[in-house]
């Protein structure tokens, strides 16, 4: 798969006028696992949200395997799974099991197939014991695991994950990192501050002030990032 940013600018209107969130970003992301890194407010989440079509460029275009993120958004949503930074916003159904099953609705699967896939996904994310719990009653880390589980059960070709391990304890960070870095999807794009996780990806890009300032092997990009912070 290939994600192409072609002269992408994203702006937002606020009380203080127009803010530039992304500023003329050009890049092609095609490594199986790409990490987006940078300081708070640099534009990482905006990049991820723009790839998913949740945010629209005010200039330029983004394509995912040739699908335009604005005009082909429905086709794109069928292929991509998005894990938000605030996982509580992502649960729709009352219980954990129902929320995972929702992803498989409308796909023409038999009840048995749905049930088998849901139970396997719950087990893989250590959620079986919480399956009947109300989504609203989960801790933040449990909600983050549920969000990932509900995305992965749909077997998307592309996973966009915004800080997927930020709320997790060490054991579950490892579990989720392993799930994301294993070939769970053809392509995974992660926004993260976890530099160990970045080093386990195939490529990294660094964003600063809404611009893409570096792209390359994770070790090199992490070193440039650390140097830029420490001066
Ligand atoms: N709707 C909006 N209106 C105005 N400014 C916005 C809007 N959304 C984001 N921003 C600003 O755009 C900039 C980039 O935000 P973004 O969420 O992409 O940063 P980030 O790199 O993901 O940061 P963090 O590491 O803190 O999650 C920030 O300065 C943010 O305040």
Image (cartoon, rainbow, N blue to C red):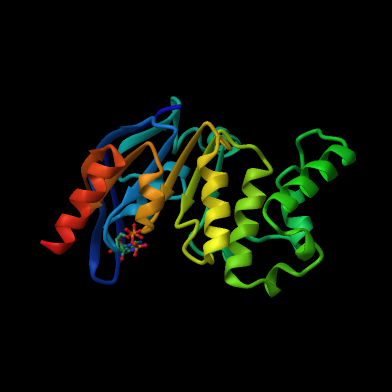
Horizontal and vertical percent for residue 32?
44, 33
Q: Which residue shows up at 50% across the image and 56% down it?
A: 164
Residue at 65% across / 58% down in the picture? 146
Looking at the image, residue 72 lies above or below residue 45: above
User: Is any part of residue 199 visible from this angle?
Assistant: yes
In the picture, residue 3 is in which quadrant? top left
Tell me: 207 left or right of 130: left
Q: Work out whether residue 59 can be spotted.
A: no
- Residue 42 quadrant: bottom left
Q: Quadrant of the C terminus?
A: bottom left
Q: Give the quarter the ligand 1 occupies.
A: bottom left
Give residue 229's position: percent from left, percent from top. 18, 61
In the displayed structure, 102 sits above or below 92; it is above
Residue 33, x across and y down, in percent: 43, 38
Above/below status of 20 relative to 199: below
Q: How many marks?
A: 0
Which residue lies at the image location 64% right of the left edge and 37% below the top edge? 155
């Amino acid at each position: 798969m290939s994600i192409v940013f072609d002269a992408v600018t994203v702006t937002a209107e606020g009380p203080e006028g127009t803010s530039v969130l992304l500023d003329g970003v050009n890049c092609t992301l095609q490594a199986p696992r790409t990490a987006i890194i940078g300081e708070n407010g640099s534009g990482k989440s905006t990049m991820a949200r723009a790839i998913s079509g949740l945010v629209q460029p005010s200039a330029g275009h983004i394509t995912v395997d040739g699908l335009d993120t604005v005009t082909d958004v429905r086709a794109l949503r069928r292929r991509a799974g998005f894990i938000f930074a605030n996982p509580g916003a992502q649960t729709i159904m009352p219980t954990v099991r129902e929320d995972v099953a929702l992803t498989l609705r409308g796909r023409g699967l038999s009840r048995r197939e749905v049930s088998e896939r849901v139970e396997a996904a719950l087990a893989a994310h250590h959620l079986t014991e919480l399956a009947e719990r109300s989504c609203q009653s989960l801790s933040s880390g449990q909600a983050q695991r549920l969000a990932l589980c509900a995305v992965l059960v749909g077997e998307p070709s592309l996973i966009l994950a915004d800080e997927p391990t930020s709320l997790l304890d060490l054991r579950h960070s490892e579990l989720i990192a392993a799930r994301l870095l294993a070939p769970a999807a053809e392509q995974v794009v992660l926004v993260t501050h976890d530099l160990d996780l970045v080093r386990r990806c195939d490529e990294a890009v660094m964003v600063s002030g809404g611009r893409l300032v570096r792209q390359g092997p994770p070790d090199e990009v992490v070193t440039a990032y650390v140097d830029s912070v420490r001066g």
